[in-house]
Image (spheres, coloured by chain):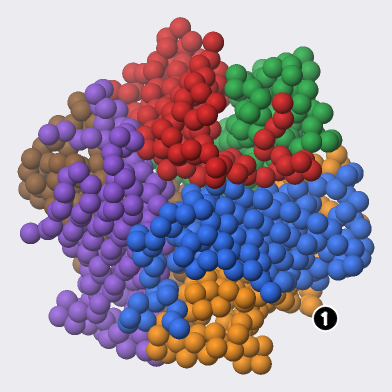
Chain colours: A red, B green, C purple, D brown, E blue, F orange
Amino acid sequence: MALTHFDAKGDAHMVDVSEKAVTDRIATATGWIKMQRETFDIITEGRAKKGDVLGVARLAGIMAAKRTSDLIPLCHPLPITKVAVDLTPDADLPGIRITATVKTTGQTGVEMEALTAASTAALTAYDMSKAVDKAMEIGGIHVVLKDGGKSGRYEAS
Amino acid sequence: MALTHFDAKGDAHMVDVSEKAVTDRIATATGWIKMQRETFDIITEGRAKKGDVLGVARLAGIMAAKRTSDLIPLCHPLPITKVAVDLTPDADLPGIRITATVKTTGQTGVEMEALTAASTAALTAYDMSKAVDKAMEIGGIHVVLKDGGKSGRYEAS
Amino acid sequence: MALTHFDAKGDAHMVDVSEKAVTDRIATATGWIKMQRETFDIITEGRAKKGDVLGVARLAGIMAAKRTSDLIPLCHPLPITKVAVDLTPDADLPGIRITATVKTTGQTGVEMEALTAASTAALTAYDMSKAVDKAMEIGGIHVVLKDGGKSGRYEAS
Amino acid sequence: MALTHFDAKGDAHMVDVSEKAVTDRIATATGWIKMQRETFDIITEGRAKKGDVLGVARLAGIMAAKRTSDLIPLCHPLPITKVAVDLTPDADLPGIRITATVKTTGQTGVEMEALTAASTAALTAYDMSKAVDKAMEIGGIHVVLKDGGKSGRYEAS
Amino acid sequence: MALTHFDAKGDAHMVDVSEKAVTDRIATATGWIKMQRETFDIITEGRAKKGDVLGVARLAGIMAAKRTSDLIPLCHPLPITKVAVDLTPDADLPGIRITATVKTTGQTGVEMEALTAASTAALTAYDMSKAVDKAMEIGGIHVVLKDGGKSGRYEAS
Amino acid sequence: MALTHFDAKGDAHMVDVSEKAVTDRIATATGWIKMQRETFDIITEGRAKKGDVLGVARLAGIMAAKRTSDLIPLCHPLPITKVAVDLTPDADLPGIRITATVKTTGQTGVEMEALTAASTAALTAYDMSKAVDKAMEIGGIHVVLKDGGKSGRYEAS
């Protein structure tokens, strides 16, 4: 198997997708940000009273999905038709679990958009909370679903 | 303790740093992308012969550091004075370990720039390799060092 | 009636338009910037002799239309097929009347693109003239026409 | 008096501010978006229950302030040190009143940043509510305060 | 013949392409950067050992193609389907010859994207090498091939 | 001599300028776009009557200077304090000669900003005129002056 982002000489290029069919495509990525118990309590209580960390992070994730082809050098620009980013507090982590789903009708998949949305939502949650906790960790960023297009459906096992 | 990114009413705002001293600031963040052994072999061999995944990811990380205040809603724009992103293959992971260091001379820290650089380098490595491995996972994204500014030196334990 | 930009839980998302038909869409928005008589005279005479305020504002409006999905968090990126921004001096205002028309062939409307173009043209006119008049006011920004798509033709009454 | 954004030949240029002092600067701009009573009720009730229009608009305004020099052709890029955007429901309008305050420590003022923040917050409120009300109008966009720098304090009368 | 980027009044506008057919389009542009022999030797040897100037320039060219409609005021945003940028050392110049090819399936051509990619790759090569040679010159930037769309095939003679 | 944009391992990085003095810096770059006589006549007459190609190109050059650190991977973001772009018709070329001057008060030079402004102005002139002339050529892009900073004054011979 070969890395498609390089040509025969080994030089990076943006893959030619002009012959690929325009199809409905969807991808979902997840991740989490882990934090101290006290930080978790501030964020989750704060949602109602003192400031909506999750709301800001959700919006940052949605906007980042639209910037994916600006950030990832060999990504194609795509007409995104839907972005949803869910942030769910998980007291056992403790921290926030993030799920990002992106759809397009285009010639290539949107897993990079979903991953970028999830990552940026996590980074934003870090930014909003770093005054009380610098040791937070972001992890578990991976693709859980990708569908549409020639390579068929992929689901993380 | 309180989240500084919200005002007394709980509304998000960009914190006023105009009274903070202009000082030399540095931050380092790390993370990794884990992959199948076969993917690892393709990437690490490929560096010399078939395409430089790590070189592209490094550059994406450096450029992303400069876009941080565009991506993270409440981040201040900063005159970045240095960005270095190292990607080191780790056969035991197997995968790539990423370290991003950012410096500025400014009124607020650069840990978000370092985290954004590390995350984007990891996302780019995913993008370059996803044709052969969709199950790669990004994790371990955290701040290992932050120095300069009133709050003093922070090192991850 | 409900706000479509929120899901059932009340969380913001980018609405799924993937099932909507790809149709020709057009929108027109207008607005104005009101200024002192002296400022109006400088701008309108200046067009021929001393500097083309309206030409710069027109171009800024056109370019802003292309940045709409970057600025408005839940806007879809759209393949814009036409942008025209007209700036007409109105001695009775006194000031400049702005009309922006945007077209696309896509799955959702372009009224936000037209409103963003009109607003940015007005802001640019402010910027170009503020050395002589800080009291200028921008107003009357609204959609006058929207057509194409399922919801049919809308014209401001 | 002359328009500073043009040179002696009448050609647009970005004014040379390299000789101006680096000082603390602040600017405040206001504006409003007027809507039907029913729309106002949905937005203001929705804040608690069905979706936070004002929270999204606030964030869009803050982020737009950072993009001002990208949007307004002859604006200087500035190291913004604070942005706050307040959105207050006004039942008499009926609609939302917007106030944006921006600070910098730099060589030129931030009134364009404040105006851009207020305008973009209003445009975002339009976008979030347009499914129920296309006839909303944005107006009253003007500078209420500008201070710092050689030209001294300006307050709208 | 007339310049299509202006309307009947002579005002700049983004041309209406909504009636044009969606077709496969391709464009190729070339250019070069000329340098001192010593600089040429450092770059070409350096590729293997001391740093990959051409790899960084190639990536910058690819990314710039995606930014074309942001940079060129009246360019339409296009769903680019392929970008390839080749940089070939030419010892006789001495310097680097650059060829950029861009494809889209859309309503207008991609020659501006190809020209922007070639120019930006050359600028980046300048940036990477300017510590050793400030006198480098960029030239020969022109379209060598444009095909697809109503105006037919164009090849530079 | 060595290329400063690579570290000891040959990996690209953004050079650390945090120890460099903050000084006034200026750079001037020039270039030209050559065209057929008929195209030249349309553009130069058009300036007064049918559309201001040079005015649009000038503005595009100014705005591009502000985007330089977004486009050139290893460029530092800089607080630009002045940009001027002059476009002068030259009947002997025939074509347009472009001169771009950029100033900053910062820790590194602005020659890339000047080169990017000149290149983008030329590309925009191409875009505006390509309906009548596809064979135009951009060349002569080089730095004519760079001053400020430790390396002293450079003037093209």
The residue lying at 26 percent from left, 57 percent from top is: C26
Q: Nearer the viewer, residue D99 or D42?
A: D42
Quadrant of res C141: bottom left
Q: Please indicate whether residue E81 sits to the left or right of residue C57 in the image.
A: right
Name the image quarter holding the N terminus of chain D.
Answer: bottom left
The residue where tag 1 is placed is F157
Q: Please indicate whether residue D108 sits to the left or right of residue C147 in the image.
A: right
Q: Secondary structure at mark 1?
A: loop
Q: Is residue A142 above or below residue C125?
A: above
Q: Is residue D26 above or below residue D40?
A: below
Quadrant of res A104: top left
Q: Is residue B56 visible?
A: yes
Q: Is residue D89 visible?
A: no
Name the image quarter holding the C terminus of chain D.
Answer: bottom left
- The kind of residue on which mark 1 rests is Ser
Q: Nearer the viewer, residue C151 or C31?
A: C151
Dot 1, crowdedness within 10 Å: few (<14), some or many (≥20)? few
The residue lying at 49 percent from left, 30 percent from top is: A149
Q: Is residue A90 above or below residue C61?
A: above
Chain of the residue displaying label 1:
F
As drawn, the residue found furthest toward the top would be A92
| Residue D29 position within the rendered picture, expressed as x and y whole percent measured from the top left | 30, 57
